[in-house]
Amino acid sequence: MITFEIMLLKYLPMAELNTTEVEHYIVIAQENRNRTLLSIPNIYLYFKSRSSNQTSKRYATLIASFYRFLSSIDRFKRIEPGDYHIHVTNTEIRQWQIFRQQLRVNRNSTHPTSETIFSDACVVYYFFKWLVEQNIPTGAKIHLKTWVANFKDRRLLSYIAKKAMLVLNTDPIRILDKQARQKKALHLIKHSEIETLLSVYPDKVYAVLFNFALATAMRPMELVQFPYSGKGKNRHIMPYSEMDKKAKSFKYEIYGKGNKYRDIIIPSYALELLDNEYIKTDYPARAKLYRERYGHKCPLSVLFLTSQGEPVTPSMIASATNYAKKLAVAKDPNFSAHNIFYHARKWWPTMMMIQHHKGEQILTKDAEVMHIALTQVIMNQMGHVDESTTYNHYLVLGRYLVMANRGITHETIHEDALNIHDALKMYG
């Protein structure tokens, strides 16, 4: 029996004469005691996912899952895993989606949703699309949509229900998707939920990071790179007590997702909070622990440290938040278990959208006409590339808040210095 696993790999790509260490996930096939690196998928992961470990892990996990499915098909039992890509057709990608739906229906589970299954299939599809672009042999046809499983088709729904041995319900997928959407209502994390979450974090640094994310819309991978003292274009970034108190905001260059640079705006109040609640109170002791642990002073490029003196990573943020959510639910049964750290990032663009449309004017038809300048500001701060999706998403969230808080207008948000924490108290 063949199994497929993923592993994080770090190495120096000498073939490119590149002295920078590369890090990304790889896929390994194992049969009995023989382990085989799958060259083609791993070359793809090198070129397409090394900019983000989270992206790399997702891509590798899905390719491994798809290969695991292929290994269960009779036709592929006679094929070496390293050659799977040559023999794959659109049919297998479609069958994989159907197979995952069968498992889901059989478990009567709302997850993964049809949307997630399709999104995962897209990741695999783009792997084969890359093969075609690189002139690497494959049976997949990238111009044909025969790889898409249409889960709205009645015959397919009946087929899946039959395979899952369901008799009473002939439309299981649609019902399960509806349940999933009900559990995943469109909302922002509430002010009361934020206060609960911040109070139960196992380490204060994660609460500080959450508040900083609220004010800046930075991703976890971007937050952990924020320095104690910056250099180059960010040389003006330092503890707030040493910065210009007259400025209401500061530009900050981010090295973010996709290995791209962009300038964002950080309000001065956020840096002041960071200084008062972490740098002055907790950082010195943590920097001392860092020196004891690693044998040298904490570099100025590192600001956020755990209580053990370790630099915070995105995976640490995710783990700490998952643990804190359990404590939050125990403390407040009304706390939504679907809240995640990433929700902090949504407040900034939502408040910007409401401010631009002067509060309740966001409910009018005119608000649906995309404002290019506003959209560009939001896209730049968020690091997004799709204008229409970005605008419409935060328009909906903004309308949700205004409709839930009738009577609150733009006077509650200062035009020159958008204070997310003040807005939370009003809209949260």
Image (cartoon, grey):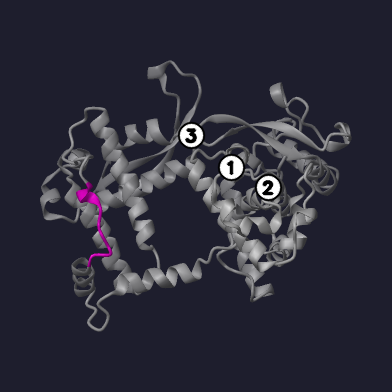
Q: Secondary structure at mark 1?
A: loop
Q: CA distance from mark 3 to mark 1?
A: 31 Å
Under mark 2, the amino acid is His
The quadrant the N terminus occupies is: bottom left
Total numbered circles: 3
Bounds of the magenta segment: 145-153
The residue singled out by tag 2 in the image is: 356
Tell whether 6 sits left or right of 132. right
The residue singled out by tag 1 in the image is: 371
* Residue 120 at x, y percent in the picture: 35, 51
Q: Which class describes the residues within 10 Å of circle 2: few (<14), some (14-19), or many (20+)?
A: some
* Residue 292 at x, y percent in the picture: 74, 38
Q: Secondary structure at mark 3?
A: loop
* Residue 227 at x, y percent in the picture: 71, 34
Q: Which class describes the residues within 10 Å of circle 1: few (<14), some (14-19), or many (20+)?
A: few
Query: Cβ–Cβ below 8 Å for labels 3 and 2?
Result: no
